[in-house]
């Protein structure tokens, strides 16, 4: 059975198939799964439907951990608290619900390593800043991670204030691009962005103010010079609407500072501070939560 015959058969029977399953029907034809992914996006755009309307789903990539539960239509409840390594981002159905009634904040993390470090210490259960949820798309976010974050942003009770959603990424063009994808969407999924974006997301860091200012070597500080590719990407981003002075003035200023300093830094830079990443995060989240109460 050819790959497209297999897909047509599955679509006719209203079966859910994965991109991976389609790819392995004819790996020589497609050469890599990303080609199948792009083709499905093209079909969805052409027919003006969502990818899910084509009964195609991507394999889970992102991870999540925190003080929340998934409530399925049949009444069964999956409690996510206590999963030290987190779990794959669930593919929620329309009738599934999320219980985030005990959540004070949500943190999106660019890197899997940082997520795993925080999950292993159950950082999301902290009396100082309240219970939270941490999630990572392992770099550039996949659709499931973005869709799940959107569901989280809409899962608060009607009479309650939704928990703020923060994003922690590297201080480089790629990090800011990831923040932008979560908040404003991506060019490749422009036809689905309206159902994926989280417009309330706040960029927590890293920012230029978080960089070390003392006179130490670049190796010791954790700073690195921008590459030619970094600079080209930053300049291109400055021309996009999402990085305009009217839409995201802070993002624009930070990109300009990045170019002026000719420096970038990874999240791991925070480990060099007293108290490390955990102390910095607690202080940063507490400060933002304080703003929310004003």
Image: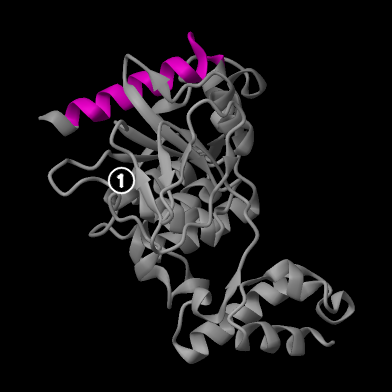
Q: Left or right of 263: which side holds 76?
A: left
Task: Determine the secondary structure under disc 1.
Answer: helix
Mark 1: few, some, or many residues within 10 Å (few <14, many ≥20)?
Answer: some
Q: Residue 53's spot in the image, x, y percent?
A: 49, 79
- Residue at 47 percent across and 66 percent down: it is 186
Q: Which residue position is annotated with label 1?
A: 250
Residue under the point 44% across and 52% down: 72
Q: Residue 8 is drawn in which quadrant?
A: bottom right
Which residue reaches farthest top? 274
Q: Is residue 277 magenta?
A: yes
Q: Residue at x 85, y 87 (%)?
A: 1
Left or right of residue 232: residue 73: left
Q: Nearer the viewer, residue 9 or 143?
A: 9
**How far from the left and from the top, in percent, is residue 217?**
62, 19
Magenta-drawn stretch contains 66: no
Position above or below: 134 against 240: above
Q: As rendered, which of 182 and 216 lies closer to the eye?
A: 182
In the image, residue 273 lies at what x, y percent? 50, 13
198 to 33, vertically: above or below: above
Residue 16: give x, y in percent of width and height.
61, 72
Up-down relation of residue 74 to residue 253 (above or below):
below
Specify the segment rendered in magenta: 272-291
Q: Farthest front residue? A: 74
């Amino acid at each position: 059975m050819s790959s497209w015959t297999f897909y047509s058969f599955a679509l006719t029977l209203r079966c859910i198939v994965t991109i991976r399953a389609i790819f392995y029907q004819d790996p020589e034809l497609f050469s890599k799964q990303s080609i199948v992914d792009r083709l499905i996006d093209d079909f969805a755009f052409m027919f003006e439907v969502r990818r899910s309307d084509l009964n195609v789903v991507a394999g889970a990539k992102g991870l999540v951990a925190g003080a929340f539960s998934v409530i399925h239509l049949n009444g069964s409840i999956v409690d996510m608290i206590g999963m030290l390594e987190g779990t794959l981002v669930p593919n929620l159905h329309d009738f599934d619900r999320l219980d985030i009634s005990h959540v004070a904040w949500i943190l999106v993390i660019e890197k899997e390593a940082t997520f795993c470090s925080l999950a292993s210490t159950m950082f999301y259960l902290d009396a100082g800043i309240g219970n939270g949820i941490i999630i990572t798309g392992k770099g550039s976010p996949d659709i499931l991670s973005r869709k799940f974050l959107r569901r989280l942003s809409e899962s608060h009770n009607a009479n309650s204030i939704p928990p703020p959603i923060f994003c922690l990424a590297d201080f480089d063009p790629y990090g800011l691009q990831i923040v932008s994808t979560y908040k404003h969407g991506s060019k490749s999924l422009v036809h689905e962005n309206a159902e994926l974006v989280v417009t309330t997301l706040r960029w927590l860091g890293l920012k230029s103010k978080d960089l070390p200012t003392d006179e130490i070597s670049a190796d010791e500080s954790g700073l690195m010079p921008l590459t030619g590719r970094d600079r080209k990407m930053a300049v291109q981003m400055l021309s996009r609407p999402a990085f305009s002075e009217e839409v995201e003035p802070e993002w624009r200023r930070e990109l300009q500072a990045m170019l002026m300093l000719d420096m970038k830094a990874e999240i791991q830079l925070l480990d060099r501070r007293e108290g490390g990443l955990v102390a910095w995060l607690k202080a940063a989240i507490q400060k933002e939560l304080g703003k929310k109460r004003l």
